[in-house]
């Protein structure tokens, strides 16, 4: 990231530390259980307030947001922050992760549930598409887990199948 911003890695590290200490951003660590594959071990950065991220991108109204190419990233940020709040408001450690292997296969969020994790795919789409399930199936096969995954999206239709449940982002982390 330091090359993209045009500063040295130590300088970027200091800036990120200040933003973390100020609770402006937080890091979502990678899930690094040994699956016999090379995994990405770099954390993902999220804004604690997705509204601040939108402001810094110059987004001033909902219409502008809908057309912005970063709407998916902002939506993912919103959902991850809600998962973080859900866990901490219930008195739990967040213990949230994401998964990405060296081939770029990724699960946006791994949400703890007892001794297992729920693979969560986050999509800003308002219509469900079966392709949203690919990363969940990949993770279930890799982890040898029968735990149903979750797809969180902007649509209103909610339903469940044997391998996943589909939820609107407003009710994504309610019991």
Image (cartoon, rainbow, N blue to C red):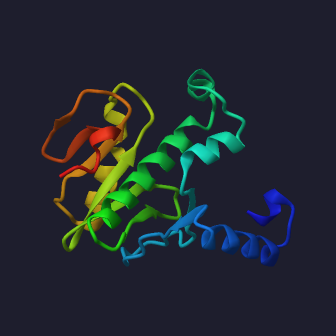
Horizontally, is 98 left or right of 169 in the view? right
Give the percent coordinates (x, y) of residue 26.
55, 65
In the rendered view, tell whether residue 48 sits above or below residue 95.
above
Which residue is farthest left?
162
Of the pair 34 and 116, the residue shown nearer to us: 116
Say if 170 sits above or below 117 in the image.
above
Q: For this view, does 129 lie left or right of residue 5? A: left
Q: Which residue is nearer to you in this view: 91 or 106?
A: 91
Q: Residue at x 81, y 58 (%)?
A: 5
Q: Quadrant of the N terminus?
A: bottom right
Q: Position of residue 166 (x, y in %)?
A: 25, 39
The answer to whether 19 appears left or right of 128 in the picture is: right
Residue at 72%, 36% in the rendered image: 58
* Res. 81 image quadrant: bottom left
Number of numbered discs present?
Answer: 0
Residue 36 position (above or below residue 175): below
Q: Position of residue 140 (x, y in %)?
A: 26, 58
Left or right, residue 14 beside residue 82: right
Q: Among all residues in the image, which is located at the extreme top?
A: 63
Judge by depth and name the residue closer to the eye, 93 or 104: 93
The picture places residue 146, in percent across and down from the top left corner, at 16, 59
Give the residue drawn at x 33%, y 52%.
120
Quadrant of residue 65 within the rendered picture = top right
């Amino acid at each position: 990231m330091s090359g993209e911003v045009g500063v040295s890695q130590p300088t970027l590290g200091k800036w990120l530390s200040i933003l973390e200490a100020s609770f402006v951003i937080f890091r979502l660590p990678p899930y690094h259980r040994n699956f016999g594959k090379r995994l990405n071990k770099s954390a993902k950065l999220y804004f604690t307030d997705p509204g601040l991220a939108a402001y810094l991108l110059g987004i001033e109204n909902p219409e502008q947001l809908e057309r912005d190419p970063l709407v998916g990233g902002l939506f993912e940020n919103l959902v991850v922050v809600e998962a973080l709040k859900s866990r901490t408001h219930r008195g739990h450690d967040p213990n949230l992760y994401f998964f990405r292997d060296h081939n770029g296969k990724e699960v946006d969020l791994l949400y703890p549930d007892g001794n297992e994790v729920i693979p969560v795919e986050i999509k800003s789409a308002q219509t469900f598409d079966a392709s949203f399930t690919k990363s969940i199936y990949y993770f279930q096969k890799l982890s040898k887990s029968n735990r149903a995954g979750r797809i969180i999206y902007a649509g209103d239709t909610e339903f469940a199948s044997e391998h996943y449940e589909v939820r609107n982002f407003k009710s994504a982390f309610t019991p």
